[in-house]
Amino acid sequence: MDLTVIWWGIIIYIVLSLLVAYLSRSDKPLNMEGYFLGNRKMNGFVSALSYSATTYSAFMMVGLAGLTYRGGVGAFGFEIIYFMGVSLVAFFGPRFWIVGKKYGYVTPSEMLGDRYDDKRVAAVISISSCIFLIPYSAVQLAGIGYLLEGMTGGGISFTTGAVLATVLALIFTYISGIRSVMWTDSLQALVMIVSSTLVVIILVNALGGFGSFFNELRTSHPDSLTVPGNGYFSFPTFLSLTIPWIFFSLSNPQVSQRLYMPASLGSLRKMLFVFLIFGFIYTIVSVMWGYSALLLFPGLENPDVATPTLLSSKYVPTILGVIVMVSIMAAAISTIDSILLTLSSLFARDVYGMSSKNKDEKRQLKVGKFIIPVIAILAYGFAELQLDLIAVLSVASSAGLIVAVPAIIGAFFWKRGTAAGVMTSVIISGLVVVILESMQLKPFGYGSGVWALLLSIGLFVGVSLVTRPPEKKANEFLSYLKSELVKIK
């Protein structure tokens, strides 16, 4: 594909995004709530599009397409499991929103630290989130690097793509915090869903229509339509991939933090409804991309280049290919800047703010802004390792974040849970994930996410039963929540 056309596409995207980000700025002085939560005044439609762009990043159009290319229909089942997990948002979302508004929580870990009446809980979970989310940010940078390098035949190098994405994420983050991120996300999400769907229609027509498309798959790649198919999606592999994904909406703080942002419970419900529609369409599109690449370009050495190979091929009109490329790049950047904001808020609020001397919000905001580029540089360094299979790396990061799930569920439903139980489960289970992933170990064939969840449940429950719970705080927190939920019903 013509390098000049691609650069013009990138330039137009940058100009439009900067304009939207600038227009989203508020004249009011920013505090922690304003910069990181948009003053809790985001409407449902914008929240939904931003939630979609943040969630469906390089993982989907590059990672899921590559996973489909590699393992077939099991990738579709794996992603559909995520939709089952989204039902957790319908259940826990109102609870997050209610207590967040009542107690002024800025981060999910701050909520847990308050609920378990120990600031160390918030600090431990924040540090754990940083450890596992930085690699996930790197996955997005790597996705952009692969995308631009693949579409230009090396004209834009992997490093250039990753550096460009890092710089843009920093710019969007600094302009106006979460407001600029959410509004640019909304623009990106609309372009993303429309353009990618058009590409699928074009590809399927090029292959003779849906009937011929699937007949060709049955003839040339029958294993791609069955599970375990070619053997990639064995039961242990499938379970290891899906377990972290089920709890993604709770375990990933850049996602759960957004439950504090809608202006009302009605806006929260609208956010979830629109997101589900968007996500289902985008899942189908991503899987079809993977299948299209398998039919048109069998034998690719790296499945993650399936998407750029398609977009730069003769089957996709040049302008449309560039638009889709830019939308994927934009979605990945939206995930990166969301993570940058979340991690900086975690550090400023729950680590730096742990000391009673550091409660001033202006100082916390300065610290949060200072730490943003540090996190970005670490993510870029990790991306340069160019590890294989973006989808698998994404799940590995989620495996490390899943260790906080028992504490989150316990915060709302188990008065007996203790701070000691939370910290023990998060620290020990997190270390186990690091060891298993670094040594590439899968005991009995199951990945780190399965063992992390089981171990964190056991440690949280076991240690909580032998330590003293924060009865006063638990009763206050849960009584207020119960009374508010009754009013909703």
Image (spheres, helix red, strand yellow):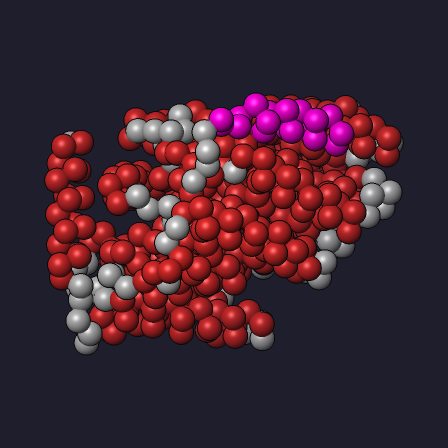
Residue at (18%, 31%) from the top-left corner? 488
Quadrant where the image shows the C terminus: top left
Give, as a single range, the part of the protein colored magenta. Answer: 10-27
**Horizontal relation, residue 406 to residue 143: left or right:** left
Placement of 244 over or under 224, stated as above or below: below
User: What secondary structure is the stretch in magenta mostly built from?
Assistant: helix
**Horizontal relation, residue 481 to residue 423: left or right:** left
- The percent coordinates of residue 389 (x first, y second) are 64, 55
Asked whether residue 112 appears in the rendered view, the answer is: yes
Residue at (80%, 32%) from the top-left corner? 6
| 127 or 286: nearer the viewer | 127
- The percent coordinates of residue 480 (x first, y second) are 15, 44
Residue at (46%, 50%) from the top-left corner? 363
| 68 or 212: nearer the viewer | 68
Numbered-mark total: 0
Is residue 235 found inside the magenta-colored segment of the image?
no
| 307 or 202: nearer the viewer | 307
Residue at (22%, 70%) from the top-left corner? 464
- The percent coordinates of residue 311 (x first, y second) are 75, 34
**Quadrant of the rendered structure where residue 202 is?**
top right
| 255 or 272: nearer the viewer | 255
**Horizontal relation, residue 24 to residue 160: left or right:** left
Placement of 286 over or under 301, stated as above or below: above
**Horizontal relation, residue 53 to residue 32: left or right:** right
- The percent coordinates of residue 30 (x first, y second) are 46, 36
Quadrant where the image shows the N terminus: top right
Asked whether residue 275 appears in the rendered view, the answer is: no
